[in-house]
Amino acid sequence: MTTKLLTALLLGTSILGTAGLAHADDVTLNIESWRGDDLAIWKDKLIPAFEAKNPGIKVVFAPSAPTEYDAALGAKLAAGSAGDLITCRPFDKSLELFKKGNLADLAALPGMENFSPVAKAAWQTDDGKSSFCVPMASVIHGFIYNKDAFDKLGIKVPTTRDEFFAALDKIKADGTYIPMAMGTKDLWEAATMGYQNIGPNYWKGEDGRAALIKGEQKLTDADWVAPYAELAKWKPYLGDGFEAQTYPDSQNLFTLGRAAIYPAGSWEIGLFNTQAQFKMGAFPPPVEKAGDTCYISDHTDIGMGLNAASKNADAAKTFLSWVASPDFATIYANALPGFFSLNSSPVKMEDPLAQEFVSWRDKCKSTIRSTYQILSRGTPNLENETWVESANVINGTDTPEAAAKKLQTGLDSWYKPGK
């Protein structure tokens, strides 16, 4: 073997060895999630943006089926095979994981200062001392409407309840459209897009929610019964057979142009954009009279935490600090219109319907769904019972007062404020 050949072989071996070592030094982080629909967004947008700024850290988004996520994640955590990063549901599901020692405390993580107390509340201990997930996004409630229908009938966007019901009356009298697309068969729709949508204007958002938790207010108080009285008035506007109408039925009625108004969560925006062949707009829950303070359900929906058993904790914290940054917020919120950043830095939305929803934060006070924190830990479960009673009130099988009494009696049976 010649000296030149030997030198070349040794040099080649050296280069290969160095390349191998560099590759071995890369850290790979795995993300657990239930949001399989977001796979392309993570793969094509979010992960490349992070990896470009953080060479040496690779990220893999590995979702499970939504209905299987909680059980699958629990099994992986027990077996020690769960990913480094855990996508967090709001409130008790994630709090339980933290109490079991599965999620690390992130209160001191750089970037957590970018979130308000309301944004962090869904992933904190009851005393607020420990935070275990970085807030990622919320969903906002309101009403999506068919602009073409409103223009055809000469209807202005309602801002007060009187204007809202006048609009419904005009749509019904014309007969071209079902005034509002919402069914009661699936129950949750009546509560989530009904009671929790309009309710905050009555119980004054966070003030009322906090008072309920403290025991200073009850579900039988006027501010909590009144939203049910308004829901009962929706019945004539929901179309024939709404009692047997499922959630997908409601979506289809609206996107096919058969209904003029849709009581909505902002998560509908992406789907509606692909299906509706007409112009859409949105308005927040109408207030009693012009000039009243408006309140919106700006509900904390998704966060991300650190698996306490991760062998790559430092790299995972680097990633989570990026998730807490305005850069992530901008990419995520625009890739998923209708899932709004919880970061204190404002994000300009490219989608006009999403921008309309998020603009309400500037003029209304934000709150979260009243049943989600603390009040649904016992049996009967207040969240699930609110589904039932909201449907019953709209169907006319329970009065607003009877529904409120059932809910408060159930809550009293296990919940003792302050304990």
Image: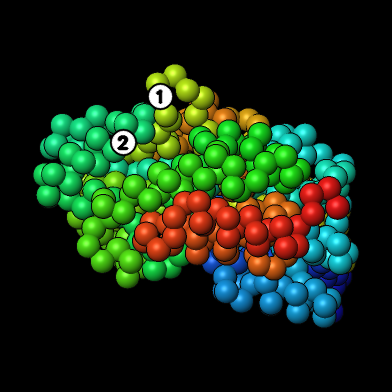
Amino acid tagged 2: Phe
Alpha carbon separation for disc pair 2 and 1: 11 Å
Res 79 quadrant in image: bottom right
Residue shown at 24% from the left, 37% from the top: 167
Q: Which mark is residue 203?
A: none
Is residue 81 positioned above or below 98 on the image? below
Is residue 304 positioned above or below 97 on the image? above
Q: Secondary structure at mark 1?
A: loop
- Residue receiving disc 1: 289
Query: How packed is label 1: few (under 14 Cα within 10 Å), some, or many (20 or more)?
Result: few
Is residue 71 positioned above or below 131 on the image? below
Residue shown at 43% from the left, 30% from the top: 287
Residue shown at 73% from the left, 36% from the top: 117
In front of the other: 113 or 376 = 376
Amino acid tagged 1: Lys
> Residues at badges 2 and 1 in contact (C-beta under 8 Å)?
no
Give coordinates of residue 399: x percent, y percent. 44, 55
Q: Secondary structure at mark 2?
A: helix
Give coordinates of residue 37: x percent, y percent. 50, 63
Q: Quadrant of the N terminus?
A: bottom right
Give coordinates of residue 261: x percent, y percent. 29, 46
Q: Is residue 119 in view from this perspective?
A: no
Mark 2 and mark 1 lie on one chain; the one further toward the N terminus is: 2
In front of the other: 10 or 152 = 152
Q: Is residue 34 in view from this perspective?
A: yes
- Residue receiving disc 2: 164
Res 97 quadrant in image: bottom right
Query: How packed is label 2: few (under 14 Cα within 10 Å), some, or many (20 or more)?
Result: some
Give coordinates of residue 236: x percent, y percent. 26, 52
117 relative to 198 in the view: left or right: right
Res 23 quadrant in image: bottom right
213 relative to 334 in the view: left or right: right
